[in-house]
Image: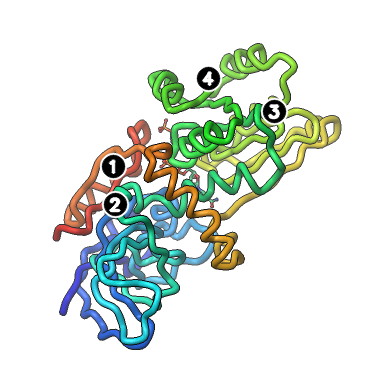
């Protein structure tokens, strides 16, 4: 049986090198399962991988797609943990932009059946990154303040929603004024424009309140503003570089405030984490999604065949959320 996938034979501009391709499905053996993929987001990392601009070399030919969700369609004779029809997400690696994925059962995590499929397709990367930023660097107490830039990104929105659930306050910076009310209705305590005026407004709101943790997905001047807000010994966790500007730490922040600079890469964390640690992180996030306490905004859903339009849209700024590929349709 043939199945479609989106692959690249060479690195380059996503809309030029990505192609729809048919491949023969292998027969299943032992602990293997075949998953009928339903939805997959286009994350910045997917575009970076296609461009050959990621943390690991891209090695074409390769089926693209860092995350997605689907249902188990067929199971090998020795499979124990999954059954036909289970909603699953792949736990690591790529290859999610495909109608089918075939791998060992431990490659997939089973999610609650009632979870929205589009939301489930985005669970593993952005919410998990947000969760790690909030849990892994210091023990935040209720009432603590966390600052972040790119607050309307997938990760940023997840930080707002997890922080709200756990009783932390968020100070958020965005590039567009129309996002201010939207993020407040999501649970953000304060939202400012990511510029010098926004920083001054945030300072005057905070007065003597301490900001012990800040999440940086932009770099350049925006990251310097976060460092400015951080209290002595505060931690800046850099997980993205949307401006493509280097992180520059003014000497005074390191000398007089002893700020700590950290970097987070979820792929590395997942590789190191045992399955129990990964499960313990994903389960409460899946539960939040199921309850409607964690929602990742969606900009537009494109059928797989419209992949060129989809990647072009994903590269535009000012989107209202994630661009999603619908893998159910041809
Ligand atoms: N380290 C990790 O493990 C990890 C995990 C997940 C994500 N990430 C990274 O985190 C970042 C956000 O990812 P995401 O999936 O949450 O993003 P997303 O939902 O696709 O949103 C992109 C965000 O970046 C902003 N942006 C775009 N171009 C920008 C620029 N030139 N300067 C400043 N902001 C800009 C957008 O603002 P507008 O809406 O105003 O355009 C939007 O807030 C990316 O760099 C991604 O690679 C890293």
| Image marks 4 and 2: residues in contact by CB distance under 8 Å | no
SS type, badge 4: strand
Residue 323 horizontal/vertical position (percent): 30, 44
In the picture as drawn, the residue positioned furthest to the right comes out as 256
Identify the residue under disc 4: 192
Inter-mark Cα distance, 4 to 2: 32 Å
Residue 117 marker? 2
| Image marks 3 and 2: residues in contact by CB distance under 8 Å | no
Q: Quadrant of residue 300?
A: top left
Identify the residue under disc 3: 211
Q: Earlier in the sequence, mark 1 or mark 4?
A: 4
SS type, badge 1: helix
The mark closer to the camera, 1 or 4, is 4
**Residue 321 is at least partly visible in this image:** yes
Inter-mark Cα distance, 3 to 1: 35 Å
Q: Is residue 41 above or below residue 258?
A: below
Residue 174 horizontal/vertical position (percent): 48, 26
The mark closer to the camera, 3 or 2, is 2
Inter-mark Cα distance, 1 to 4: 26 Å
| Image marks 3 and 1: residues in contact by CB distance under 8 Å | no
The mark closer to the camera, 3 or 1, is 3
SS type, badge 2: helix
Assign the C terminus to one quadrant of the image.
bottom left
The mark closer to the camera, 3 or 4, is 3
Inter-mark Cα distance, 3 to 4: 15 Å
SS type, badge 3: strand
């Amino acid at each position: 049986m043939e199945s479609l996938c989106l692959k690249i034979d060479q690195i380059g501009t996503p809309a030029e090198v990505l192609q729809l391709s048919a491949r023969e499905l292998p027969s299943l053996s032992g602990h293997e399962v075949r998953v009928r993929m339903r939805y997959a987001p286009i994350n910045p990392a997917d575009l970076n991988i296609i461009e050959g601009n990621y943390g690991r070399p891209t090695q074409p030919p390769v089926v693209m797609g860092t995350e997605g969700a689907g249902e188990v369609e067929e199971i090998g004779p020795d499979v124990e943990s999954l059954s036909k029809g289970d909603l699953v997400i792949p736990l690591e690696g790529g290859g999610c932009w495909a109608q089918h994925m075939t791998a060992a059962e431990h490659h997939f995590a089973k999610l609650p059946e009632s979870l929205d499929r589009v939301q489930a397709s985005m669970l593993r990367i952005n919410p998990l990154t947000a969760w790690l930023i909030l849990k892994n660097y210091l023990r935040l107490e209720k009432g603590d303040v966390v600052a972040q830039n790119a607050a309307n990104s997938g990760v940023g929105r997840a930080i707002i929603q997890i922080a709200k659930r756990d009783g932390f306050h968020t100070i958020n910076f965005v590039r567009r004024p129309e996002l201010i009310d939207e993020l407040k209705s999501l649970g953000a305590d304060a939202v400012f424009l990511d510029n010098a005026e926004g920083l001054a407004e945030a300072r005057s709101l905070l007065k003597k309140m301490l900001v012990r943790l800040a999440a940086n997905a932009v770099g350049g001047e925006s990251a310097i503003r976060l460092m400015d807000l951080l209290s002595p010994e505060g931690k800046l966790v850099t997980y993205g570089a949307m401006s493509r500007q280097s992180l520059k730490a003014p000497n005074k922040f390191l000398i007089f405030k002893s700020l700590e600079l950290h970097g987070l890469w979820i792929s590395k964390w997942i590789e190191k984490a045992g399955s129990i640690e990964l499960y313990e992180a994903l389960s409460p996030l899946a539960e939040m999604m199921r309850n409607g306490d964690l929602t990742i905004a969606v900009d537009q859903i494109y059928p797989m065949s419209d992949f060129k339009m989809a990647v072009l849209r994903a590269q535009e700024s000012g989107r209202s959320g994630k661009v999603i590929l619908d893998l159910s349709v041809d």
